[in-house]
Amino acid sequence: MTPDTIARKLCNLLVPDAQANLASYMPALGTIGAMIVETPTKQAIESFREHYGGLWVGGAVTLSRTHLAFEPNGMNRALHHGDSSLRVPLSEVRDVTREWGFISGIISIRTTRGTFKLRCWRARAFADVIRQALPGELPERAAS
């Protein structure tokens, strides 16, 4: 973490256009296994995407004094096509709310570019930390 970092948290980001890279794990199944699994797996992923409005991509979010950034973890970089990274200046954040989520909570962050969602443990407390970091409301850093 840099001196500018306020918090870092493991989380999932809901990515509306995330595309699963099924080919990345099909070789391990062999030709027959891949043929058996591929269609049901694609159907399950599409059903999930339709229900949630995207796919949850695992990684970590870093909150600094100037921005909020999400980086997917290695496994999710391998399992999804494209780059799911996100970097939003705090000056663009308009609202931070907490939503109910099964097992873990969801933080909805409305920005000038649109709304994105994070899923993590202790979502309510992390949403409070993000709100406090918004321009004009930055909390004092705790002594290290």
Image (cartoon, rainbow, N blue to C red):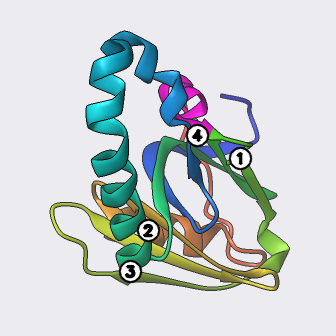
> In the rendered structure, which disc, 1 or 4, sits on the residue that comes first in sequence?
4
Left/right placement of residue 85 relative to residue 122 reads right
Label 3 crowd bin: few (<14), some (14–19), many (20+), radius 10 Å = some
Residue type, numbered disc 2: Arg
Cα distance between the residues tagged 3 and 2? 21 Å
Q: Which residue is mark 4?
A: 80
Q: Amino acid at mark 1?
A: Ser
Which residue lies under the disc numbered 2?
49
Q: Residue at x 66, y 40 (%)?
A: 81
Point out which mark residue 37 bears.
none
Mark sitting earlier along the chain (3/2)? 2
- Image quadrant holding the N terminus, namely top right
Label 1 and label 4: CA atoms lie apart by 12 Å
Q: Which residue is mark 3?
A: 98
> Which residues are drawn in magenta?
73-80
Asked if 85 appears above or below 139 in the picture, the reply is above
Q: Secondary structure at mark 4?
A: strand
Q: Earlier in the sequence, mark 3 or mark 4?
A: 4
Query: Mark 1 sits on what residue?
Result: 85
Q: Indicate whether 7 appears above or below 143.
A: below
Instruction: Determine the secondary structure under disc 1.
Output: loop
Q: CA distance from mark 2 to mark 4?
A: 13 Å
Asked if 139 appears above or below 80 in the picture, the reply is below
